[in-house]
Amino acid sequence: MVARNDKAEVLAQVCARLASGDTTNARETLRSGYPFAPQAKVARRYTERQCLRVFYRDGFIDRYSGTRLVNPGVLRALSLIFPEDFPAHPNWQMAGTHFAFWELFPSIDHVVPVTRGGTDDETNWVSTSMLRNSAKAHWTLDELGWSIVAPGDHRRWDGLSGWFVEHAASHLKVATHNYVGRWLRATMAVRSEMTEGDLPPRTV
C-alpha cells in the first residue's frame, strides 16, 4: 500500500510494473497515484493601494519570518538620494540593485497558492519579502516547514511610511519621481482611510 503523499513510492511501483512488462498497469498506477496536474501561470497584479492595505494590516511585517519590511516608496526614494550606496537598477538586475530590494521589499503572497486551490483574495493574502515570496513560489507552508507569524502593529512600525510622506512634502525630486510618486500617492490615500488613532506619531 502506498503511504500518503509518498510520491517516490508511486514511481517505484510504476517502474516495477514497467520492469515486468506491464505498461498498462504502470500507466494506471501513475494516473491514479501521481496524476499530472498542469500548473498554469497566471499573472496577478495588484495596485499600490491594494498592496499597502495588506502591508498596513500586517504591520509591515513579513508574516513568514517576522522581519520588519519597508514601504517600497521609501526604498526607491533612498536610491534616489544615495544612487551609489543604495542603487536600484531600472530592470532590477541583482548586480546593480541593493539587496534590500529583495530582503526588505514587501509583496503580497498567497498562503495557499492559487495553483494549489487557494483563493485570490485578502483572506489568503499575507505580506512577505520579495526574497521569501520567490522562495515559496507554488509550495505550501507544510511542504516548506514554514508557519505564519502574528501580524505587527502599524502604529509601532509603519515601514517608514510616515517618514516617507513627511520627507516627500519638502523634496520635489522624490515626490515627482514616477515610481516613487505612485507609492507616495497610494500611501497618502491609505493613511487617509485611517482614523487619527490608527496612525503612528509623527517622526518630527
Image: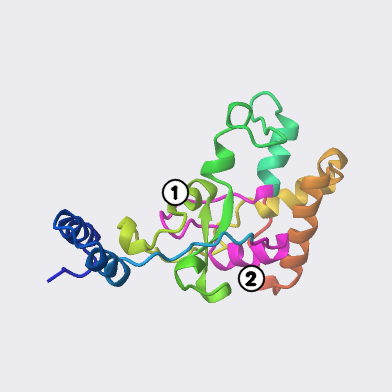
- Res 21 → quadrant: bottom left
Image vertical order of residue 187 relative to residue 99, above or below: below
Residue under the image location 70 percent in, 74 percent down? 195
Q: Main secondary structure of the magenta part?
A: loop
Image vertical order of residue 3 relative to residue 177, above or below: below
- Could you tell me residue 35's position as x and y percent? 35, 67
Quadrant of the snapshot with the N terminus: bottom left
Q: What is the span of residues highlighted in magenta in the rendered image? A: 44-72
- Res 49 → quadrant: bottom right
- The foreground one among 88 and 167 is 88
Residue under the image location 59 percent in, 62 percent down? 55
Residue under the image location 70 percent in, 34 percent down? 79
Which mark lies nearer to you, 1 or 2?
Answer: 1
The residues bearing labels 1 and 2 have C-alpha atoms spaced at a distance of 33 Å
Find disc 2 in the rendering and name its residue.
198
- Could you tell me residue 19's position as x and y percent? 16, 54
Callout 2: helix, strand or loop? helix
Q: Is residue 20 left or right of residue 199?
A: left
Q: Farthest residue in the top direction?
A: 84
Q: Which amino acid lies under the numbered mark 2 shown in the image of this protein?
A: Asp
Report the disc number at residue 135: 1
Q: Is residue 28 left or right of residue 61?
A: left
Q: Which amino acid lies under the numbered mark 1 shown in the image of this protein?
A: Ala
